[in-house]
Amino acid sequence: MNITALTRGMKGILIFSIVLIVGFTIYNPVTVMKQKVIILSYINKFIGHSKASPAQTNSSNLTPGMISNQSRVELGPVTCLPNLSFNSLTANLKPIYKDFMMYRHCRDFPLMLKAHSCEGKNIFLLLVVKSLAENADRRASIRSTWGQERMIGGAWVRRVFLLGLMESRIRSQAVQAMVDLESEQHGDVVQWGFRESFFNVTLKETLFWKWFSEDCRAVKFVLKGDDDVFVNVDNVVEYLKDFNPSQDLYVGDVFRNWYPMRFKGSKYYIPLFLYGNEPYPPYAGGGGYLLSGTSIMKLYKASVSEELFPIDDAFVGICARRAKIEVVTHRGFRTYGNIPYDPCIYKGLMLVHRVTPNELWLIWSLLKDNTKTCSRLTRISLKL
C-alpha cells in the first residue's frame, strides 16, 4: 500500500471517529469523555497496526486482513470458486440473485471473532442475536436492556451477536475496528469472514448451527432473534422451565401455507428455479423464536443435505421438516404488526419485532415502572 493511500485511510478513520464522538455528545453528554478516551485510544492502536488485507476470494464472500486481537481466530483466506452454470437463469434478475447462485455452494468461512458466551457456565438460555457490523447502537441498547447476562430464578442467561463483514467497502475498515473493540470489551461477538447481504442471512444461520454444535453443546435453550426485537427474558425463562432440553423445541410466530413471493419487485421474490409452486413448510417468523439445543444440532445435521435458500426463516422450516421437528405457535411472539406502548401488554409478551433502539429503551423503562396495576385481560398466557 503506498503512503498516499494509507494517509487517506487514516484520515477516513479519524473523520468517522469524530462523527461518533459528536454523536455521543448529543446522545449522552454525561458519558462523552469516557467514550472519547475509548475511541481515540483505540484509533491510535488500530492505525499503528493497520496493514493491507490479503487477496480476497470473491465480490460477496471475503476474508479480511487479520488484526491482532485476543478473541480473533487467525485463519487464512478460504478459496471457493464461483458456479457459473446458473448465469442464464439469473441474467434478467437483480445482481443479488446471480451472486447468490454463483456462491451458494460456499458454506465454509473463517471464524474471525469467537465469543466466550458458552464458556464456564451451566447455561440455561443463550440469547442469540443476528446483527450487522455497523449496527453498534442496536447491540449497545440490547446489552443495556433485555440482553443483560444474568441469573433468573437460578437459570443462567448469556448472549451472543452473530456478524459477517460489512457489505459496503467504503467504511468497512473503521467499522471493523469498532467491532473488534466490542469483542474485546464484551466477549459476545461471533463473526465470520463473509460479506453480509439479504440472501447471506441463511449462510449465517448454518454457520451459527455449526459453531453451536462445536462450542455450545451444553446450552439447554436458545432464543434466536434479530437486533431490532424486544424480548421479555423473564417470561421466556418461566415458559422454558416446563420443557425438557433433551427434547425438540421450535416455538414462535408460525406461518403456515405461505407460498413463495412471485412479484419481481419484492425483495422476497423467489423464481421458480429456486422453489416450485408448493407452499413452504410451516416456519416461525425470523424476527425471533425459541429452540432447544437438541433441535439446533438436528437442524445443523439436516442442513448439510439441503441447498441454501435465500429466505432464512423459510430455510429453517425446510430443515425442520427434514429433521422431523414440529414448529409450535405461541401468541407471545409478535413478529409483525404494531404493538402499543402499554407496559401491561409487554409484561405478558415474550418477543416483539421491529423495535428501534429508542423504542427499546422506552419499552424497558415502561416495564420497570411498577406503579401501574394491570388487569388479567391485558396479559398473554405463557402457556400454549
Image: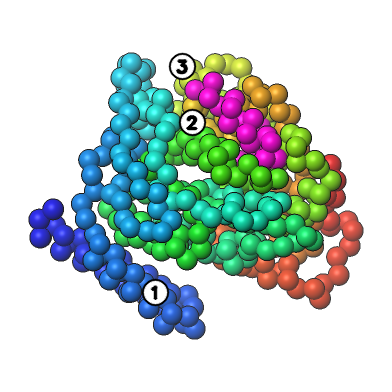
* Numbered disc 2: secondary structure: loop
How far apart are the two marked residues, 2 and 1, measured between alpha carbons? 38 Å
Side of 223 where 77 appears, left or right: left
Proximity of marks 2 and 1: CB atoms separated by less than 8 Å: no
For the residue marked with disc 3, what is the amino acid? Answer: Phe
362 w.r.t. 266: above or below? below
At horizontal 40% and vertical 53% (from top left) the residue drawn is: 72
Could you tell which of marks 2 and 1 lies nearer the N-terminus?
Answer: 1
Residue on which disc 3 sits = 273
- The residue wearing badge 2 is 310
Check residue 294 for magenta coloring: yes
**Helix, strand or loop for disc 3:** loop
- Mark yes or no: residue 281 visible: no
Let me know if residue 194 appears in the view.
yes
What residue did someone put label 1 on?
38
Task: Give the x, y percent position of residue 218.
Answer: 66, 45
The span picked out in magenta is 283-307
Q: Is residue 209 above or below residue 160?
A: above
**Which residue lies at the image location 37% right of the left edge and 58% below the top edge?**
69
Q: Residues within 10 Å of mark 2 (few under 14, many from 20)?
A: many
Q: In front here: 104 or 48? A: 48
In the rendered image, which quarter is residue 184 located in? bottom left
Classify the position of the C terminus by image quarter.
top right
* Sequence-wise first label, 3 or 1: 1
- Point out residue 364 in the picture as x, y percentages from the top left corner: 67, 66
